[in-house]
Amino acid sequence: MKRDTRINLLLVVVVAALAVLPLVLGLGDHKEEPFAGADAQAETAITENAPDYDPWASPLYEPPSGEVESALFALQAALGAGVLAYYFGLRRRRQGEARSAGSPAGAPDPSGPPTEEGADGGRDTPASA
């Protein structure tokens, strides 16, 4: 197995462990909503510390349910991942094309010995001053 493949598999295992371990270990079982988002936790903290707080801004769009909100968030994440994947794929393709165009098979080595003047009509050598 190649070194890159082992590293990629190790990274996949680490990411899967980060996603699964909190659920398996029961982290957050003592809370009413164990894995609430940061927005909900901030709202709870603000209402506990300053019950008379009046928000100065309101959302532009309030989804009708939590499921719709989750679906929109997943769509946003998928679009972002798609843009990043497209960018990195395009970048890698351009790097591959640059490498393959750098020295085609059978082409003379540009760092090879200089040609004698007149052998090719003087095109590879500077003009005499």
Image: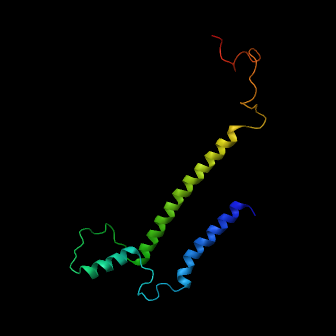
Is 95 left, or right, of 38 in this rendering?
right
Is 76 left, or right, of 14 in this rendering?
left
Front-most of 123 and 84? 123
Front-most of 55 and 2? 2
Q: Quadrant of residue 69?
A: bottom left
The answer to whether 68 is drawn above or below residue 1 in the figure is below
Is 48 left, or right, of 30 in this rendering?
left
The percent position of residue 100, horizontal first and vertical second, equals 69, 42
Q: Residue furthest right?
A: 106
- The residue that appears at 22% across and 76% down in the rendered structure is 53
The percent position of residue 68, horizontal first and vertical second, equals 42, 74
Q: Residue furthest bottom?
A: 30
The percent position of residue 13, horizontal first and vertical second, equals 63, 72
> Which colour scheme appears in the figure?
rainbow
- In this rendering, the count of numbered labels is 0
- The residue that appears at 63% across and 48% down in the rendered structure is 93
Question: Which quadrant is the C terminus positioned in?
Answer: top right
The answer to whether 34 is drawn above or below residue 75 in the figure is below
- The residue that appears at 46% across and 72% down in the rendered structure is 71
The percent position of residue 110, horizontal first and vertical second, equals 71, 30
The answer to whether 11 is drawn above or below residue 43 in the figure is above
Q: Residue furthest top?
A: 129
The answer to whether 119 is drawn above or below residue 55 in the figure is above
Q: Quadrant of residue 49?
A: bottom left
Question: Which quadrant is the N terminus positioned in?
Answer: bottom right
Front-most of 127 and 36? 127
- The residue that appears at 34% across and 72% down in the rendered structure is 62
